[in-house]
Image (tube, rainbow, N blue to C red):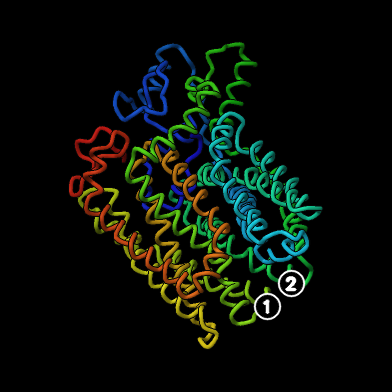
Amino acid sequence: MPSEPIEAEFVFPPALSQEQEDEYRKLEREGPLTPNHQTPTATTTLTDTITMNELEKQYTNQGFHLVEFTPGAGEDPREWNKGRKWAVTAAVSFLCLAVAIGSSIITGDLEGPAKEFHAPQEVINLTVTLYVLGFGIGPLVFAPLSEVFGRKPIYCVSIFFYFIFTLPGALAPNRATLIVSRGLAGVAASAPMCNVGGSVADIWAVKERGFPMAVFSATIFLGPCLGPLFGGWIGEKAGWRWIYWVLFIFVGACFIFTLIVPETLASVILRRKAQKLRKETGDDKYQTLGELEAQPLFQTLKVAISRPLIMMVMEPIVLFMSFYLSFIYALLYLLFFAFPFAFQGIRGWSAGMTGVSFISVMIGMLIAICAMSYQEKLYAKVTRDGSFPEARLYPMMLGAIILPISMFIFAFTGAYASVHWMGVCVSGAVFGFAMIILYIGANSYIIDSYSNFAASAIAAKTLMRSCIGSSIPLFVTQMFSAMKFQFAGLLLALVACVIGPMPFIFYRFGERIRCNSKRATKARRGQGFKGDSNAKH
């Protein structure tokens, strides 16, 4: 898998060691590293591996001139000036914002196309389902392709097709056109979501990423909530087609960013430098480590697709944490349909004002992002005698308690018009807070547990999350209509209670599970990484 996973950027202290991060930069491949001429496969484990320095030494002894960045020459994106770094950060953040908003903005008026095309509401809801499903499928292909072609070409192609496939939504003469174009747009739009984290890591060193990641995280987490905020007013005042027109215009503006943003992928920049040196000197011994270790595209795609599926089935931590995060993701998309029930259906609000209610969720998210600094202090205190992945679970354990509370509040305030609307908004804020600390805690634990296979572990989670999240629009309307609002909400709260003990179970037994895994790190509490040849740091 080619890019340092975007989730790794939110982990602090860093879950990836400097060597592992260098491996992502130079090789655009996750480990473990094997001696040259040995091909890693989807089933490669942590045995018979070597370090990056040992691999470089092997090739040097064979007479190769390994091409590296020249310090101080400005070749390395991490040596660019702050202005250029911030320009790139802003550009790629807008790409993610366009993708995130696109997933939910059309929920501002789903009744419009249903009436115009005389289609059942569930059929029109497929416009959300197929778009979100594309988030899980697309990265399995786009991620390894960026290894070959670089980030910039993938951004250009991805956003261009996202731009093109958004247009049929605005002009759709029938429901089939609308649904199919949304599915294609979702697959195309998935590329920024799996590559932008790598772009940020390309240009900012770990110690510099704090504020840039705060800015970037706002687009990732807040984007889906901004969708119904804008879509509600546009649909109410101008009609559902104008939702697609506005999205089309915004994506078009973002496409311009892809044309001017420079290439940031270190392996591609070094490859171009090596090609130039070979042309100038006529010496084919000038090679980058990435070129020497390059695998055939078919092999790269095979590993990128198969390894996440293998880990999802074979690794309990990946399986259960992915399921938990999928449930949270599903709840977020459920709110896009449940809030209209609570505010439009029960309280008689307009679509525009219903969209405004999502500000409550965003407030909770922002509070959680600001509060994560306390987790850093707690992590430092708990790991004084050595790091271990379970120390990442404290935010998740708190979130597992808060999440059911938010759902209980939602169930018993949203169902009754006599209850003040602030009750529903409070539940939204509490949910937003719980979602972020659960998301960051669980992702940190996955990455720390499988730091040598972080990209594949996260790809497995993303696939499951998108599959489960995309199913929500297919039954949420019937669920809240047939079960009635309070009992549908109560069911969600009870499910949250049932799976709530999961982080506590992994805190207690996670070490034993990791030690029985061929891919997980073997760090133990109180021992750090002493005696663990497979460990990081």
Write down the residue under mark 2.
236
- Number of residues whose C-alpha sits closer than 10 Å to that of mark 2, classed few (under 14), some (14–19) or many (20 or more): some
Using the image as rendered, state which of residue 214 and residue 106 is in the foreground: 106
Using the image as rendered, state which of residue 200 and residue 155 is in the foreground: 155
- Inspect the image, locate mark 2, and give the three-letter code of the amino acid beneath it: Glu
Q: Is residue 408 above or below residue 76?
A: below
Q: Is residue 231 above or below residue 51?
A: below
Where does the image place residue 296, in percent across and percent down from the top left? 53, 21
Where does the image place residue 76, in percent across and percent down from the top left? 55, 37
Where does the image place residue 221, in percent across and percent down from the top left? 53, 60
- State the separation of the CA atoms marked 2 and 1: 8 Å
Q: Secondary structure at mark 2?
A: helix
Place residue 192 in its image quadrant: top right
Is residue 83 among the parts visible in the rendering? Answer: no
Relative to 386, is 372 on the left or the right?
Answer: right
Instruction: Report if the CB atoms under discs 2 and 1 are less than 8 Å apart.
Output: yes
Relative to 346, is 68 on the left or the right?
Answer: left
Write down the residue under mark 1.
350
Work out whether mark 2 precedes mark 1 in sequence or the reverse, and give the earlier one. 2
Q: Quadrant of the C terminus?
A: top left
Relative to 336, is 468 on the left or the right?
Answer: left
Name the residue rendered at 44%, 68% in the picture. Answer: 433
Q: Secondary structure at mark 1?
A: loop
Where does the image place residue 146, in percent across and percent down from the top left? 58, 34
Per the rendering, the mark at residue 497 is none
- Number of residues whose C-alpha sits closer than 10 Å to that of mark 1, classed few (under 14), some (14–19) or many (20 or more): some
Q: Is residue 297 above or below residue 254?
A: above
Name the residue rendered at 73%, 49% in the picture. Answer: 176
Is residue 477 among the parts visible in the rendering? Answer: yes
Tally the numbered discs. 2
Place residue 348 in its image quadrant: bottom right
Place residue 250 in its image quadrant: bottom right
